[in-house]
């Protein structure tokens, strides 16, 4: 999807865009609903300056900070993820890079999760090289998560302690090691729709497997703490465009779906989305699990209607 095709999408009425996105979701993915759960396994004290993030040490957000959780706690969280219906469990750590000891501890934990819990293990551990990825893959890791966050043009307005190229380098190293890749970003940070499209096109070029779309939840103490909330219609339009561009990739709604989409959460699954995070996020609680389980049943009904 380039040039005139993209411009045509931007001019489509929302109803037509939704119908087109849903048709593509049906054609390429059918009724596949991807559910994952994540654990904030190491929190805060990050030296990066991402303007949206509560875990940056330079932002006074008052979040809980702690070192890498013990193996027993991470395994217990993986077991809970499976119990609540998640197909994937993601280990997430703050900071740009792990120490050798931390990486080895996570590899050991991943091996036990895959062998004993029988759930697909994923991780989001910052910047890594191919050698490090191969260690995790050997331990049983199936997918690595590393968001682009936004399009290349807007990226320097959000973070300056690392570059867009750094992000791409990590994604390519994960792919070269044989891992699947999960990469998306955040909408509602002040970027334009063109910025979002550039991110989608980059993800398409990188051939990532799963694309999580977060809607900014402004957090007090961050530079984006007073950013206006993105409207439901614009969030839905963005997700529909991502589906049309990305065709057969998983498009997953993540943090912010509750506040941005409100009563329209089910509609987003008729607008191209086919996955979501359940059971909470990193520093944000998220929706009650019972409500999400009801939503999952509603999605199934909508897809069977």
Image: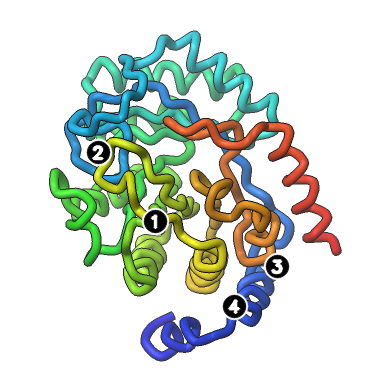
Q: Quadrant of the N terminus?
A: bottom left
Q: Is residue 155 visible?
A: yes
- What residue sits 41% from the left and 9% below the top? 70
- 68 sits to left or right of 256: left
Q: Are marks 4 and 2 in contact (CB under 8 Å)?
A: no
176 vs 57, left or right, is right
According to the picture, the residue beneath numbered tag 3 turns out to be 26
Tell me which label, 4 or 2, sits earlier in the chain: 4
Q: CA distance from mark 1 to mark 3?
A: 33 Å
Q: CA distance from mark 4 to mark 1?
A: 21 Å
Q: Which residue is more in the foreground, 171 or 211?
A: 211
Residue 192 coordinates in the image, percent (x, y): 34, 70
Q: Nearer the viewer, mark 4 or mark 2?
A: 4
| Tag 2 residue | 127
Q: CA distance from mark 4 to mark 2?
A: 37 Å
Mark 3 and mark 2 lie on one chain; the one further toward the N terminus is: 3
For marks 1 and 3 on the same chain, the one whose residue lies earlier in the sequence? 3
| Residue at x-position 17% and y-position 57% | 156
Circle 4 is placed at which residue position? 14
Instruction: Give the number of the mark in front: 3 or 4.
Output: 4
Q: Secondary structure at mark 2?
A: loop
Mark 2 or mark 1, which is nearer to you? Answer: 1
Separation of disc 3 and disc 2 at Cα? Answer: 35 Å
Could you say whether the residue bearing mark 3 is in a helix, strand or loop?
Answer: helix
Q: Is the residue under label 2 in contact with that under label 3 (CB below 8 Å)? A: no
Dot 4 or dot 1, earlier in sequence: 4
Q: Are marks 3 and 4 in contact (CB under 8 Å)?
A: no
Farthest residue, direction left? 161
* Position of residue 176 measured from the top left corner of the image (x, y, whole percent): 32, 48
């Amino acid at each position: 999807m380039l040039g005139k095709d993209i411009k045509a999408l931007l001019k489509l009425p929302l109803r037509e865009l939704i119908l087109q996105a849903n048709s593509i979701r049906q054609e390429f993915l059918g009724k596949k609903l991807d559910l994952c759960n994540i654990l904030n396994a190491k929190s805060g004290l990050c030296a990066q300056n991402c303007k949206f993030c509560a875990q940056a040490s330079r932002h006074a957000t008052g979040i809980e900070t702690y070192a890498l959780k013990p193996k027993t706690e991470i395994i217990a969280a993986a077991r809970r993820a499976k119990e609540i219906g998640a197909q994937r469990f993601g280990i997430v750590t703050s900071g740009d890079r792990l120490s050798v000891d931390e990486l080895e501890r996570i590899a050991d934990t991943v091996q036990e999760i895959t062998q004993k819990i029988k759930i697909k293990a994923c991780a989001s551990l910052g910047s890594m090289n191919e050698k490090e990825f191969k260690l995790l893959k050997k331990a049983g890791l199936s997918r690595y998560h590393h968001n682009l966050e936004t399009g290349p043009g807007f990226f320097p307005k959000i973070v300056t302690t690392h570059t867009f190229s750094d992000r791409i380098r990590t994604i390519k190293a994960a792919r070269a090691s044989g891992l699947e890749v999960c990469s998306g970003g955040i909408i509602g940070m002040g970027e334009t729709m063109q910025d979002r499209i550039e991110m989608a096109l980059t993800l398409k070029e990188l051939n990532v497997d799963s694309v999580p779309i977060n809607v900014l939840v402004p957090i007090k103490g961050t530079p984006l703490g007073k950013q206006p909330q993105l409207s439901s219609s614009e969030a839905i339009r963005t997700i529909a465009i991502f589906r049309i561009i990305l065709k057969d990739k998983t498009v997953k709604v993540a943090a912010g779906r509750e506040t941005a989409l409100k009563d329209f959460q089910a509609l987003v699954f008729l607008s191209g989305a086919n996955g979501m995070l359940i059971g909470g996020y990193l520093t944000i609680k998220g929706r009650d699990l019972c409500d999400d389980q009801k939503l999952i049943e509603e999605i199934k009904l909508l897809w069977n209607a």
